[in-house]
Image (tube, helix red, strand yellow):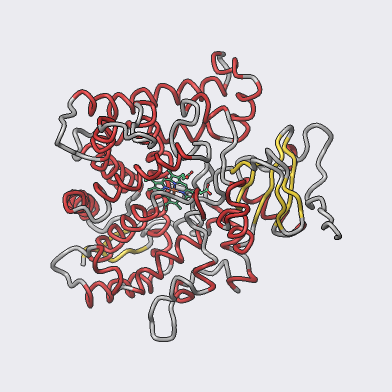
Amino acid sequence: MFSRIKQSLPGPSGWPILGSLLDIDTSNLHVSFDKWTNEYGPLFLCKMATKTLVVISSPRLVKQALVEKCCSDVLNDRPDSFFSKYIMDDAMGVVFGKYGQTTTEIKKFMYKGLNTHCQGAPQFEAMTQKELEKLIKNVADQKGKDFNPFEFVSTSLANIVTILFSGSVADEKDAEIIWEYNKAIRGSIEVTTDTLLWAFPFLRFLPVEVGRKYRRTMQAKEELLKRFFQSNKDTYEAGRERGLVDFLFKIQSEENKEGEIQCLTDSQIKAIIQDVIFGGIGSVTYSILSMLLLLVHHHDYVEGIYQEIVNVVGLNRFASLQDLPAMPYTEAVILETLRYITIVPITASHRAMADIELEGYTIPKEAAIIINIWTIHHDPAIWGDPWVFRPERFLDDNGGLLPAEHALRQSLVIFGAGPRSCVGEELAGSRIFLYLTSLVQKFDLLPPEEGTGISDDPRTFLPGGVLRPPDYKMRAVSR
Ligand code: HEM
């Protein structure tokens, strides 16, 4: 029989030794990858010094590579990196965990903990409402004048994370600790920093920029774990679960059933705490801030959401998660925001554990696989007018939300796909819905009185793993 000829993947030829390192915008990888997708197609390979990257930019190939069993078992590992080894304690948690039973078990605990203590859990939802009331008061205090929503929204969401971990907000410093950790890790995980420190790990001790970034991160990590790991451990009581961290201590104390990985180590619990902040705080905060900016620019949707709130929820209570299925218009605005902005433009790197064939090409063992979500979400062949913010694209002729199996919804890769997809999808989606509806219920959202305001085009947003809009001002006029 004829064996299939395995072709080499197309891609930029690059330079000797350095490969395409000098041709790539390391802060905006998604932009360089987008350009190369136009030249080489939705599956290409590029070299970055010693690293081989394979970039995938079509929903069909994402399913084949990450979801279908034949490829998925080979392409869902994570590569080694300085960040995962030195900052995430040898990839103890989920985000950087090696593909296999241990990571799968930890991920299951994370899902179970989030389902028990988070989305839909009565106490958590009651505490979320209290945070929303505080946020609404802070916004109302601006009395319809120009204000920057960043501080209020970011503090409010950090408080939600604190409640998730510990059941309550102890003091204002909690939010500072969370945001300092988030800012510090964003500096350390940047590709050039990570590549340099991976090649020359001793630099972390020297008075150079990458060393300073590393030491800032370690300091922030120490503070974070003192607050959310150690203080919970010191006050943990069996039979009382204040939040996710106590839930994990409970699992840790349960007897290890034979043949099952039942016992979580302290290091794994610490890594889960870091995973939640690493994965969750920036992504949700900047999604909400981007959405407010979009609504200020596209005021008709503020009115549309408000009308839906009046019809479904009324004005005497906050919307709850049970209202969501009856609010397709609001859900379409959320989906379109997450598509248009694409807050996480590329996935974390996956590692090919062996040579594998995809579309007749060989993906080499050890290649880093990256999904360019940005390109998929802005592909004119899928969306027609990708650079237009148009929530109606997710609605049918009767105003109903397109079903999940519709081709357009299937082309959304907001939270990744397959075994490495996002643990926090439900938590993120539910918080975005609750924050959006609470603010629109109480306020009309308007552009600032002074100045022209900033662009809502995500191509102008700031990079750093998670895209974020530059600081902006808006008005919120009480209804
Ligand atoms: C709008 C908000 C969010 C977006 C857009 C988002 C997006 C993503 C994406 C694209 C991935 C990568 C999948 C891959 O590597 O193939 C991911 C992974 C992950 N996310 Fe999220 N995420 C969000 C919120 C959250 C939240 C709130 C949490 C925390 C509870 C979280 C925790 C994680 C974790 C732990 C992973 C790693 C999963 C794994 O490696 O198996 N994310 N997320």
On the rendered image, what quadrant is the N terminus found in? Answer: bottom right
- Residue 43 image point, x, y percent: 71, 55
- Residue 412 image point, x, y percent: 51, 63
Q: Is residue 182 above or below residue 147?
A: above
The number of discs equals: 0
Q: Is residue 189 above or below residue 7?
A: above
On the rendered image, what quadrant is the C terminus found in? Answer: bottom left
Residue visible at 59% across and 42% down in the picture: 349
Residue visible at 22% across and 63% down in the picture: 320
| Left or right of 461 on screen, residue 239 | left
Residue at the right extreme, as displayed: 2
- Residue 386 image point, x, y percent: 57, 68
Q: Nearer the viewer, residue 345 or 424?
A: 424
Q: Nearer the viewer, residue 422 or 214?
A: 422
Residue visible at 44% across and 82% down in the picture: 396
- Residue 56 image point, x, y percent: 65, 54
| Left or right of 53 on screen, residue 460 | left
